[in-house]
Amino acid sequence: METKFEVTLEQEEVMRQAIRTWGKEKQDRKTVEELSELTKAICKDNEDSKIEEIADVFIMLWQQAEMCGWDNVNGCISYKLGRLDIRLNASYAVDTTGKVNHGI
């Protein structure tokens, strides 16, 4: 099973053209709109709607990363995945109140 999004150079150019055509402000608002629609699809647990909205959100997040700078976004992703790895591999203990101590 493939676990990544694949985007062709032609598709990248279409997304860049959207940024040039509508501008950052409009694409920011569109990103919020698409995130909201994905939230609703997740809450309704509708698989077909989720797939469609994931695609819309991916397109908008790609544009956001393009506008913010891929190096910045990729650096942040690396940091956050490293932190998640530490949390996943930390020893977990439950204290006497029933709260989980993540060991960090």
Image: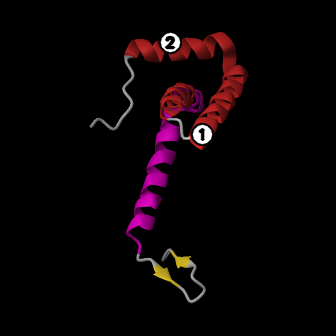
Coordinates of residue 71 in the picture (x, y in percent): 48, 37
Q: Which of marks 2 and 1 precedes in the sequence?
A: 2
Identify the residue under disc 1.
Answer: 44
Which residue is pictured at 53% across the width and 29% down the height? 49
Mark 2 lies on a secondary structure that is helix
* Number of marks drawn: 2
What secondary structure do most residues of the magenta stretch adopt? Answer: helix
Coordinates of residue 104 in the picture (x, y in percent): 50, 74
Mark 1 lies on a secondary structure that is helix
Gap in angstroms between the C-alphas marked 1 and 2: 31 Å
Label 1–label 2 contact, CB within 8 A: no
The numbered dot on residue 14 is 2
Q: How is the image coloured?
A: secondary structure
Quarter residue 34 falls in? top right
Q: Tell me the crowding category of disc 2: few under 14, some 14 to 19, or many 20 or more residues within 10 angstroms, Cα based.
A: few
Quarter residue 12 falls in? top left
Residue type, mark 1 in image: Lys
Which residue is pictured at 41% across the width and 72% down the height? 90
Q: From this view, report whether residue 82 is shown above or below residue 97.
A: above
Which residue is pictured at 68% across the width and 22% down the height? 24
Q: Residue furthest left?
A: 1
Q: Magenta segment, which residues? A: 62-90
* 67 falls in the magenta region: yes
Which residue is pictured at 58% across the width and 79% down the height? 99
* 24 falls in the magenta region: no
Coordinates of residue 4 in the picture (x, y in percent): 36, 35
Taking depth in this image into account, of 14 and 30 the one nearest to the observer is 30
Q: From this view, report whether residue 9 is shown above or below residue 28.
A: above
